[in-house]
Amino acid sequence: MTNTVTALNTDEASAQDIGAYMRSVGQAARAASRAIAAAPTDAKSAALQAIAAAIDGQRERLKAANAIDMEKAATNGIDQPLIDRLLLDDAAIDRMIEGVLQIDKLPDPVGEITDLAYRPTGIQVGRMRVPLGVIGIIYESRPNVTADAASLCIKSGNACILRGGSEAIESNRAVAQCIEAGLAEAGLPAGVVHLVNTTNRDAVGELLKLNDCVDVIVPRGGYGLIERVSRESTIPVIKHLDGICHVYVDAQADLQMAVAIAVNSKTEKYAVCNALETLLVAQPIAAEILPLLAEQFQAAGVELRGCDQTRVLITAEPATEQDWSAEYLGPTLAVRVVEDLDAAITHINDYGSQHTDTIVTANYANARRFLAEVDSATVMVNASTQFADGFEFGLGAEVGISTDKLHARGPVGLEGLTSQKFVVLGAGEIRRR
């Protein structure tokens, strides 16, 4: 995007050049963060509506830029799931526009005062929701993340620095130009959203050092990216490393419902962090339901890896200890027969990644215990794990999913991009000890 930052020749940039460029980006974002934090809701709404209109009006330009990325991806032998995520066709552009407009319709969290109460001294004490400041978002493949992340940051009053993957650089640049146009039309500074204009990997390392300019980092991508960011960052990170999600079919489950939920949790999309990776089945119904499940998974081309009890009942490869903590991101599923609810909860808390887990049951008490005792960011009853998504949760979109316990947990939307400060309202009170 065109911002007041150091010019960078991306073909000849040295490590020193990259460092200077990223520092200028960070400083410009910090300056712009003050403007967007003070922007009224109407101005932010006008920007989002203008961004959506610009994306709609630039469809052909977006698709032409994306075609360049798609051609390079095919030439470079990028895996098909990543190519699928990279594609910007009319349907993907429609979803991008819908995401921006959904964010616009959400209540503005900034400035909301809650828990205001009088103290015995006469003062009122409450909490006001405020932006985090500057958010660095590092992501791979999906150009829609550029629009989603920028829109969430604008609505929540934050400036952002976006560092997309090299495989989507042309698509991201085209989307960023639409964002810049929308900000300008609303009278907001272009520096509110910065797209890092280089594919040099050193830019990520330099971004992670900008702890005087950036308040939080959100990595969104594969294990390698998130592990690197977590290891190198001098800035707080909102993240999840793995998506080892479980479905537990309770002894009192509706079998038809259980089959539908388990199959959808695994096969609706494979290469997503909310996909089912380990299926747990209560021993009393295993003989009845496992053949039904195996038939459905076999038809979908899913390889099953089962425990000893599972392999007595259905055809499956033997599961190893490593399978219980594997994130396959593909058509492979670990299956284990467990004695009861206690054993299921123990397995999930021992082997899971605290992402998303669901129970299928008609027993209210078991459902409540599962919700209370499974230590995950999202815990469900009688629903597919694939619903663990900011859009589905009514957040409009998300910058990522957090399995951490401090600040934000689960899909991170507008509220997750804000904090709270105490506010005190008085009428001349002074403290007397």
Image: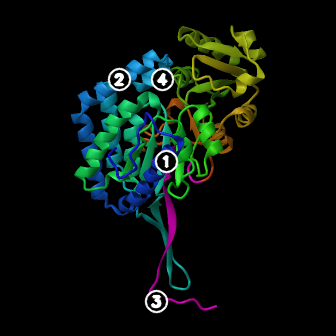
The residue under label 3 is which amino acid type? Answer: Gly
Disc 4 is placed on an element classified as: helix
Q: Give the range drawn in magenta.
A: 407-433
Q: Residues within 10 Å of mark 2 (few under 14, many from 20)?
A: some
The residue carrying mark 4 is: 82
Marks 2 and 1 sit apart, C-alpha to C-alpha, by 26 Å
| Residue 87 occupies quadrant | top left
Determine crowd level at label 4: few under 14, some 14-19, many 20+ residues with C-alpha closer than 10 A: some
Residue drawn at x 53%, y 12% as measured from the top left? 300
Residue at image position (43%, 16%) is 74
The residue identified by callout 3 is: 428
Could you tell which of marks 4 and 3 lies nearer the N-terminus? 4
Dot 1: element: strand
Q: Are marks 1 and 3 in contact (CB under 8 Å)?
A: no
Spatial CA distance of label 1 from label 4 is: 22 Å
Marks 2/1 in contact by CB < 8 Å: the verdict is: no
Could you classify mark 1 by the number of other residues whose Cα lies within 10 Å: few (under 14), some (14-19), or many (20 or more)? many
Query: Which quadrant of the figure has residue 83?
Result: top left
Q: In this view, does 363 lie to the left or right of 321?
A: left
Residue at the bottom extreme, as displayed = 432
Q: Is mark 2 on a helix, strand or loop?
A: helix
Residue carrying label 2:
68
**Mark 4 belongs to which amino acid?**
Leu
